[in-house]
Amino acid sequence: NVSLFENKFRGSVPLPKNLAPEWSVVIRSDSVEVGGSKVDVFICRPAVSARDGLDELTASFLSTVDPSQVQEGQVLSCVIDGKDHSLEEGKDFWVSASKKAAALKSVSWM
C-alpha cells in the first residue's frame, strides 16, 4: 500500500524513526495499537535527508534547505570555512527521507 500513502501524503510514506534526518522536527506524535502492538507515530516537518557520512558542517547547511525549493538532480553550492562544496540531489542528499530510503533500498518494501 505504499502508493496509497504516496498519493495521500504527496510522496511521503511511513518510515522507521531512525531514517529521519537528525534535524527533523516533530510536528505531532501519538502512540497507537496496531495488531496488538504499540506503535509510536511521528509526523515531521519536511526536510532534506543527507547521505550517511557527510561532514557535520555540510550537513548543517543542508538542514537549512527547504525541500520544496529543490529539483530532482539539482546541485546546491555553498562555501563553508572558505571551502567550496557542491551537493547533488540524489547523490549527496535527497528531498525527503522516503526518497533516500527508496534510492538506497533502506527498507525492503520500497
Image (cartoon, rainbow, N blue to C red):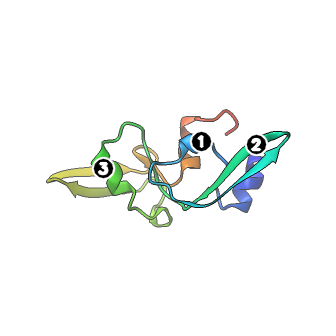
Proximity of marks 3 and 1: CB atoms separated by less than 8 Å: no
User: Mark 3 falls on what kind of element?
Assistant: helix
User: Mark 1 falls on what kind of element?
Assistant: helix
Q: CA distance from mark 3 to mark 1?
A: 23 Å
| Left or right of 102 on screen, residue 88 | left
The circle on residue 13 is none
The circle on residue 38 is 2
User: Which residue is disc 3 drawn over?
Assistant: 58
User: Which residue is disc 1 drawn over?
Assistant: 102
| Left or right of 72 on screen, residue 63 | left
Of labels 3 and 1, earlier in sequence is 3
**In front: label 1 or label 2:** 2
Q: Tell me the residue at 64%/45% (across/down).
A: 15
User: Mark 2 falls on what kind of element?
Assistant: strand
Q: Tell me the residue at 63%/35% (across/down).
A: 107
Is residue 35 at least partly visible in the picture?
yes
Q: How many marks?
A: 3
Between 50 and 41, the one nearer to me in the picture? 41
